[in-house]
Image (cartoon, grey):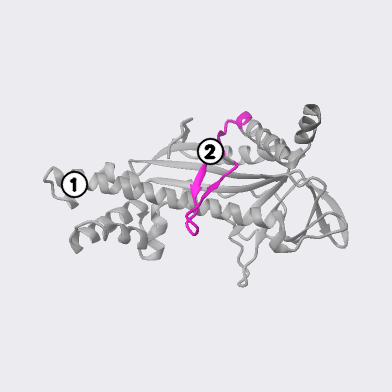
């Protein structure tokens, strides 16, 4: 009886999913990605905790305008066991629409009239002059001569991959509707994970900002004239997120009425305006090593060509 249970468990989808996660972690570790398995974040909408299957990262540092900057590149990976299923991609995009990774940094708040930072500063007893001075201080760190100070150091995502705007998830005799599709749910889950990482970063900024401002006030120093690198370092960390779904389903592409097997592809969510900022890479597990090698080489090549950029193997929030 015990042998039967063992055999059943070893062939169930749950065990296959765990094995797939282990495979992903091994391949990423082999290319010097530091991995966390099953970290959790709090969903901003439901306030419930959600899981990320694999969070991999590399950490680069450099100096820009005599100030230390940190660039954290993260892969957010979801693994899905879809044994017996086929995913057919269509709507091949022949031109690059400048997709970006999901970028998190303090300067992005500037594009939204500094809503997040202003909201933080409302929670502490500061004069309007001090609030404006703090916002101006961070804007000066994030922007130099009306441009992002760090724009040359933000990598574009891997581009040597076919891009598709639509898909079908099928088991030959049945086809799942979009709302029931595992891949579509994974697409949404990865976007939620990015937002969770962004919220966690802003929570950290708020805690650290309050602590550092309190130290200045407690030492009877003038607040604005005492803003220094200790405070400014909160603005000099840039996080770039690359979303990946690894599946054991067979991948196919449809072109000109013909079906061809696919190793990996990029599923792009086209907006009504024609834009396509939200996307994920979908990788068949049998071709995971090739994909990991290619994106690892892509990002490492980018940073190797930057001045004074060094990779540091450490994990920081």
What residue is pinned by disc 1?
226
Residue mark closest to the camera, 1 vs 2: 2
Residue 110 counted in the magenta span: no
Q: Residue at x 74, y 40 (%)?
A: 285
| Residue drawn 48% across the image and 30% down it | 313
In the displayed structure image, the side of residue 186 where residue 226 appears, left or right? left
Q: Is residue 21 visible?
A: yes
Where is residue 2 drawn, in percent x and y? 77, 27
How many marks are shown on the rendered structure? 2
- Find numbered disc 1 in the image and state the secondary structure of the residue it sits on: helix
Image quadrant of residue 278?
bottom right
Residue 49 horizontal/vertical position (percent): 51, 49
Residue identified by numbered label 2: 57
Mark 1 and 2 residues: CB-CB less than 8 Å, in contact? Answer: no
Q: Which residues are magenta?
A: 29-53
Residue 187 in the figure: left or right of residue 46: right
Q: How many residues crowd around disc 1 within 10 Å: few (fewer than 14), some, or many (20 or more)?
A: few
Q: In the displayed structure, would residue 81 be above or below residue 255?
A: above
35 horizontally vs 127: left or right: right
Q: Which one is earlier in the sequence, the residue at label 1 or at label 2? A: 2
* Mark 2 Cα shell of 10 Å, populated few (<14), some (14-19), many (≥20): many
Left or right of 225? Residue 250 is right
Which element is circle 2 on? strand
């Amino acid at each position: 009886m015990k042998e039967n249970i063992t055999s059943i468990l070893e062939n169930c989808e749950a065990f296959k999913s765990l094995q797939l996660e282990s495979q992903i972690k091994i391949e990423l570790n082999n290319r010097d990605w530091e991995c966390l398995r099953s970290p959790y974040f709090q969903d901003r909408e439901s306030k419930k905790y959600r899981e990320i299957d694999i969070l991999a990262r590399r950490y680069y540092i450099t100096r820009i305008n005599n100030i230390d900057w940190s660039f954290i590149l993260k892969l957010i990976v979801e693994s899905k066991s879809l044994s017996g299923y086929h995913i057919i991609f269509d709507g091949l995009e022949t031109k690059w629409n400048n997709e970006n990774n999901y970028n998190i940094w303090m300067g992005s708040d500037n594009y939204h009239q500094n809503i997040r930072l202003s909201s933080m500063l409302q929670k502490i007893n500061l004069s309007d002059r001090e609030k404006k001075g703090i916002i101006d201080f961070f804007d000066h760190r994030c922007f130099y001569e009306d441009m992002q100070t760090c724009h040359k150091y933000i990598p574009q995502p891997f581009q040597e991959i076919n891009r598709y705007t639509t898909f079908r998830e099928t088991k030959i005799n049945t086809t799942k509707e979009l709302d029931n599709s595992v891949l579509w749910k994974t697409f949404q889950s990865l976007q939620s994970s990015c937002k969770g990482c962004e919220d966690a970063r802003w929570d950290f900024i708020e805690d650290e900002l309050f602590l550092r401002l309190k130290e200045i006030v407690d030492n009877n120093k003038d607040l604005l004239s005492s803003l220094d690198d200790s405070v400014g370092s909160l603005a000099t960390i840039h996080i770039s997120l690359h979303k990946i779904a690894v599946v054991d389903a067979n991948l196919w592409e449809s072109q000109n009425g013909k079906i061809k097997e696919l190793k990996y592809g990029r599923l792009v969510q086209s907006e009504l305006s024609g834009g396509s900022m939200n996307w994920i890479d979908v990788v068949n597990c049998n071709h995971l090593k090739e994909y990991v090698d290619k994106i690892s080489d892509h990002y490492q090549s980018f940073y190797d060509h930057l001045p004074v950029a060094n990779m540091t193997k450490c994990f920081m929030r």
